Amino acid sequence: MNKPEFTVDWTTMHFPSWKKLVPNPEKVNSFLEIGNYEGRSILWWATYLENAELNTIDPSTDLERRQRLLRNISKHPRANKINLRFGLSDLELRRFGPNTMDVIYVDGSHEVKTVLSDALACYSILSLGGTLIFDDYAKEETDFDPYGLKIKVGLDAFLEVAQAKVVYKGYQLAVTK
């Protein structure tokens, strides 16, 4: 099997935390990731969650990156178990029913209003006892938000509204339902 090709690594440092947040991978039946970039994280989840149906939503329109993502996924032994959708999360999330995902990892848009919208929609499809992980909670850069807001603003609003149980708060944020 050819090895995947990555140009950056924003996720490897999170793998130990994810194992702690999802300590019983054999019990996970359904997984969703929003934002795939080149596929490093979904490939890790595909290996770690060996029994789970894997769903992804990638909003990127960058064709070169999309092709790299597809090549990287195709090299994984469970490639046929990864249901990849390209599109905007606010539209694609409507395809999933309430309480249907055991684990969700969100690293899509960095625009605060979209982060808040994704958080609320993902929480509604998260199963009881499920884990919802957000990347970049403590990210200082505001380059992607038109109003110069940090992602934390949207996620703190989500926490206020959803009253979700916070199980980890650092660079990433994780909650359970």
Image: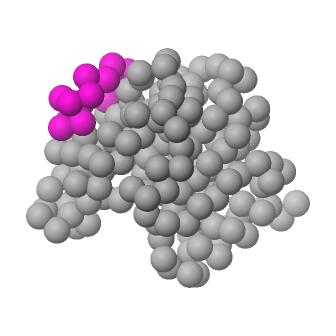
Residue 54 appears in which quarter of the rendering?
A: top right
Q: Is residue 92 above or below residue 172?
A: below
Residue lying furthest left: 147
Q: Is residue 156 above or below residue 38?
A: above
Magenta stretch: includes residue 67: no
The residue at the point 52 percent across, 38 percent down is 97
The residue at the point 20 percent across, 30 percent down is 161
Q: Is residue 27 above or below residue 159?
A: above
Residue 39 appears in which quarter of the rendering?
A: bottom right
> Could one spot residue 138 in this view of the protein?
no
Query: Where residue 25 sits in the image (x, y, percent)?
Result: 67, 26
Q: For the C terminus, give its image quadrant.
A: top left
Query: Where residue 31 sits in the image (x, y, percent)?
Result: 60, 38
Of residues 71 and 27, the one drawn nearer to the viewer in this rendering:
27
Q: Is residue 70 above or below residue 128?
A: below
The residue at the point 50 percent across, 29 percent down is 99
Residue lying furthest right: 1
Query: Where residue 126 sits in the image (x, y, percent)?
Result: 47, 31
> Could one spot residue 113 in this view of the protein?
yes
Query: Where residue 140 sits in the image (x, y, percent)?
Result: 21, 52
Q: For the N terminus, give its image quadrant.
A: bottom right
User: Magenta span covers which residues?
Assistant: 156-169
Magenta stretch: includes residue 159: yes
How many marks the image carries: the answer is: 0
What is the basis of the colouring in this image? one colour
Q: Is residue 116 left or right of residue 43?
A: left
The residue at the point 84 percent across, 51 percent down is 77
